[in-house]
Image: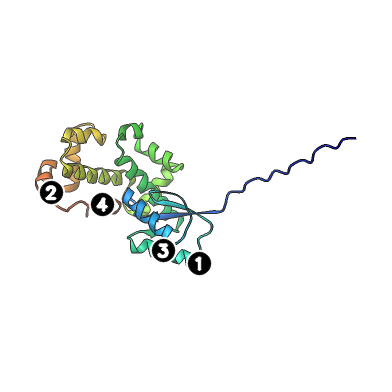
Amino acid sequence: MTTSPAKKTRHKLVPPETTTLFIKNMVCNRCVRVVSEELRALDLDLRSISLGEAVVAGRVEGEMLRNVKGALERNGFELIEDRRARTIEQIKLAVLKLVRSETLEKELSGKYSTYIARELKQEYQSLSALFSSMESVTIEHYIILQKIERVKELLKYNELTLSEISYKLGYSSVQHLSHQFKKITGLTPSRFKKMMGNTRKSLDRVAPPAR
């Protein structure tokens, strides 16, 4: 009589617990590098990091949480713990990603509202209402402000013509860009180029003009 070989017990690999840190003011690759260095300096096991978000192994609480907050604040960042504030930051980062995209028209492929809703996987109407109530400006106007800041940046680089900048940022014409630029800044693009200085605001701190 033969006996069947013992069945091997298979254990499912349970992924380690992780904590997602939502971080305000991460707007560029340099920000990602700085945050990454700070978290690793705290001996945190960094699993992934992108604009506005870092995933680390284990739970971050108590003294470690305070250390993370302190390290971020020393570098001009802020840990976001409020759910609504997280959503606002995600909207801003989605806008930033769109405006700075090298293929804006391809990224957009429709209305801004469709793009925002797709990026955050939420209904645009509720996102729009939340953004307006907390930021005192609509998402649409915020996008315009960000686009104008990007135009300023490209004008300072002096590598593209105004026509090329207009196309790059999805304007229907140079006239449309120029009209919007003057409405926001009070200057024409050509006048701005002549007055170039350290006037560009941080992309995450653009505020609506005083009324």
Query: Which residue lies at the image location 48% right of the left edge and 68% below the top edge?
Result: 63
Q: Of label 3 and label 1, which has the lower sequence position?
A: 1
Q: Is residue 110 left or right of residue 163?
A: right
Inspect this view and state whether residue 177 appears.
Answer: yes
Q: Residues within 10 Å of mark 3 (few under 14, many from 20)?
A: some
User: In the rendering, which numbered label is found on residue 69?
Assistant: 3
Res 208 label: 4
Three-letter residue code for mark 4:
Pro
Q: Quadrant of residue 105?
A: top left
What residue is pinned by disc 1? 62
Q: Earlier in the sequence, mark 1 or mark 4?
A: 1
Q: Nearer the viewer, mark 4 or mark 2?
A: 2
Location of residue 77 in the rendering, given as x and y in whole percent from the top left corner? 35, 59
Counting the numbered discs, the total is 4
Q: Earlier in the sequence, mark 2 or mark 3?
A: 3
Residue drawn at point x = 17 percent, y = 33 percent:
163
The residue identified by callout 2 is: 196
Q: Nearer the viewer, residue 70 or 189?
A: 70
**Label 2, label 1: how far apart the Cα atoms are:** 47 Å
Q: Residue furthest bottom?
A: 63
* Amino acid type of the residue tagged 3 in the rendering: Lys
Residue 95 horizontal side relative to residue 5, left or right: left
Question: How much space separates mark 4 and mark 2, taking CA atoms?
Answer: 21 Å
Q: Pointers 1 and 4 in contact (CB under 8 A)? A: no
